[in-house]
Amino acid sequence: MREDFPILATHIGKRPLVYLDNAATTQKPRAVLQAEMDYYEKVNANIHRGAHYLSRLATEQHEQARGTVAAFLHAQSEREVVFTSGCTAGINLAAQVLALSGLVREGDEILVTTDAHHSNIVPWQMLCGRTGAVLRPIPLTPELTFDMAAYEAMLGPRTRIVAAPYISNALGIINPIPEMIAAAKRNRPDCIFLVDGAQSTAHMAVDVQALGCDFYVFSGHKVYAPTGTGALWGREELLEQLPPWLGGGEMIKEVSFDGTTYNDLPFKYEAGTPNIAGNIVLAAALDYVQKIGLNRIDEHEQRLTRNLYDGLTALGGIDILGPREGRGALISVLIPGVHHYDLGTLLDQMGVAVRTGHHCCQPLMQYLGTTGTTRYSFALYNNDDDVAAALSATERALNMLR
Ligand code: PMP
């Protein structure tokens, strides 16, 4: 499949690119690049309400794309899929409409995991600021896994919202989302549970109905689609009950100076001209992933991740965050005496692209007592050579830095 990704032929100086920054963003296959080109060459028009051929074609493809996303997530209905510019936009949309809804009151509690991304913390803090609700972090175990016992002890009559990443972008651990949702709903059936699928959607199959969550968000650019794409899935009954947020074209049925009636789902949440090309291309990316099969992708990435884990362990003196098992396709490390930025810079000089820093998880970094980590993350096109290159580059860099 490497052949499908033209950018992988890049060289950094004389060295072939070893791209291990997939948790930040993935590279795009030819099928996706071609879909973007096809759209602008053959389809481009504004959608909905257009009387002409191209507008009908663009509308048809756009709504088919929604169907692809709905099927990918196993949504009950396409009405539950709201196109967004990504996870950040999706979580902000959910938090903003909950703030407007009156469903969140003073003293209510919003629980988030310690490993949550800023985009799954700050929108809830803003909601707390407006409603008087309180944000409470759910602790980690000493092994840096989700602390189920502590979470269950925190659940109570005031727990209104729980938000968690399926896979932590900074630790790589898979949170026990099905069990977390079940516990939240046992405690309080109307508790609203949001799953941040930023790091899971490209790596493991998801069924939002089986999970029983209320919101699921993901970013297209982490699933081989362009930046500025993604979706928020929301349970239909809840979306029906919640108010709109952005006002404008498309989200209305009737407007007069006396008032406005709002459009049906999902258009109630899609004010303005959407990212028509992006949404159509997002569907092409999901089709590409489906064709390969998420189970195959997961199996392949799991093997690479375990090999890297074992290789880094064998190098010695590297503190790998979180356990070997129960992790997604990424590994984050701390190396005593070595600054993550220095390591990242040396790895880059050897052609290995990793991410260093706080990974937009400053509260987690505070908990770990560090300013940042070095993160290696895989996608479907990585291979054994990439693991070997990452290990030998890391060994050489550490020899220089220590
Ligand atoms: N949540 C997690 C777990 C992430 O890894 C990211 C991206 N690093 C986001 C949310 C935000 O995604 P985006 O910047 O695409 O909105």
Image (cartoon, rainbow, N blue to C red):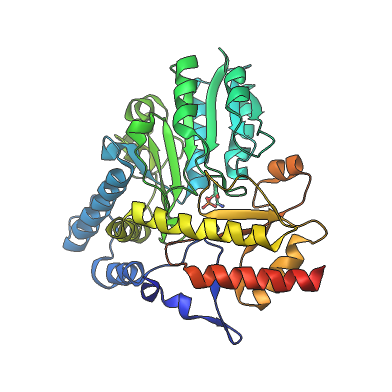
Measuring 37% from the left and 52% from the top, which residue is drawn there?
274
Pick whichever, 181 or 193, lies toward us. Answer: 181
Residue 123 seen in the current view = yes
Return the x and y of residue 8 as percentages of the image width and height.
Answer: 47, 75
Quarter holding residue 362: top right
Residue drawn at x 69%, y 35% is: 142
- Is 209 in front, or is 313? 313
Image quarter hosting the N terminus: bottom left
**How many badges with numbers are in the image?**
0
Residue lying at the far bottom in this picture: please name it: 14
**Residue at the image point whose x is 33% and y is 56% from the top:** 286
Could you tell me residue 226's position as x and y percent?
43, 62
Q: Position of residue 361 (x, y in %)?
A: 66, 46
The residue most toward the front is 314
The answer to whether residue 99 of the structure is visible from this angle is: no
In the displayed structure image, the side of residue 247 where residue 34 appears, left or right: left
Q: Which of 265 and 165 is in front in this view?
A: 165
Q: In this view, does 41 lie to the left or right of 201?
A: left
Quarter of the image with the C terminus in it? bottom right
Q: In this view, does 42 lie above or below 114?
A: below
Residue at 76%, 51% (x, y): give it: 371
Q: Residue 168 location, x and y as percent?
A: 57, 45
> 283 or 272: which is nearer to us?
283
